[in-house]
Image (cartoon, rainbow, N blue to C red):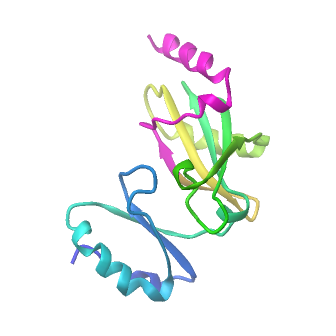
Amino acid sequence: NLLDLSVIKKTTWEKAVLKPAISGGSYRTTLFDRENWPQIEADYLEFAQENDLLLQCFLPEILSAGEISLIYFNRKFSHAVVKTPKEGDFRIQSQFGGHYAIYNPDAELLQTAGKIIACFEGELLYARIDGVLHDNQFLLMEVEQIEPDLYFYLHESAKNTFVEAILELL
């Protein structure tokens, strides 16, 4: 059995999120209460035979404050976006009614994201650092390095910054 969600019993999590390790747009992403793990495990058992999954604690701050995306071009901060779900949903993607807005990170958040960027070796044309603020601490959810959405439509000058980053690496 490649999938064993009983590990959730050893946590203090009230809710959890199960999702494919490689996916987009909340494909096969499920939010569930901790006592419902047997049903979720049964639902995902066949899928787990051929796909890696991530199990994450659900952070309710996503519902109120949203998920923050910090976008870097050639290891330099470009812009940030906050993504919030529509009422009654947990998914922040626009196809599910999520709302995106420009976000102005403070110096501490930029320092934290900069440390994450520094973990990667070699050239790094772009990266998107996604996370949530929990008890005034940034918790990393994922690092996107093959992301198709860098929110250029929200930050017009980012297009030029991206082109400059490409030219720097050429």
153 in the magenta segment: yes
Residue drawn at 50 percent across, 84 percent down: 34
Residue drawn at 59 percent across, 66 percent down: 89
Image spot of residue 122 (x, y percent): 43, 28
25 displayed left or right of 57 = left
Image spot of residue 87 (x, y percent): 67, 65
On the question of residue 76 being in view, the answer is no
Rendered position, 89 above or below 95:
below
Image spot of residue 67 (x, y percent): 63, 53
Rendered position, 15 above or below 121:
below
Residue drawn at 45 percent across, 82 percent down: 8
| Closer-to-camera residue (152/137) | 152
128 displayed left or right of 25 = right
148 in the magenta segment: yes
| Closer-to-camera residue (11/118) | 11
Image spot of residue 81 (x, y percent): 67, 41
Quadrant (top left/top right/bottom left/bottom right) for the N terminus: bottom left
Report the number of discs.
0
18 displayed left or right of 13 = left
On the question of residue 18 being in view, the answer is yes
Q: Which residues are magenta?
A: 142-170
Quadrant (top left/top right/bottom left/bottom right) for the C terminus: top left
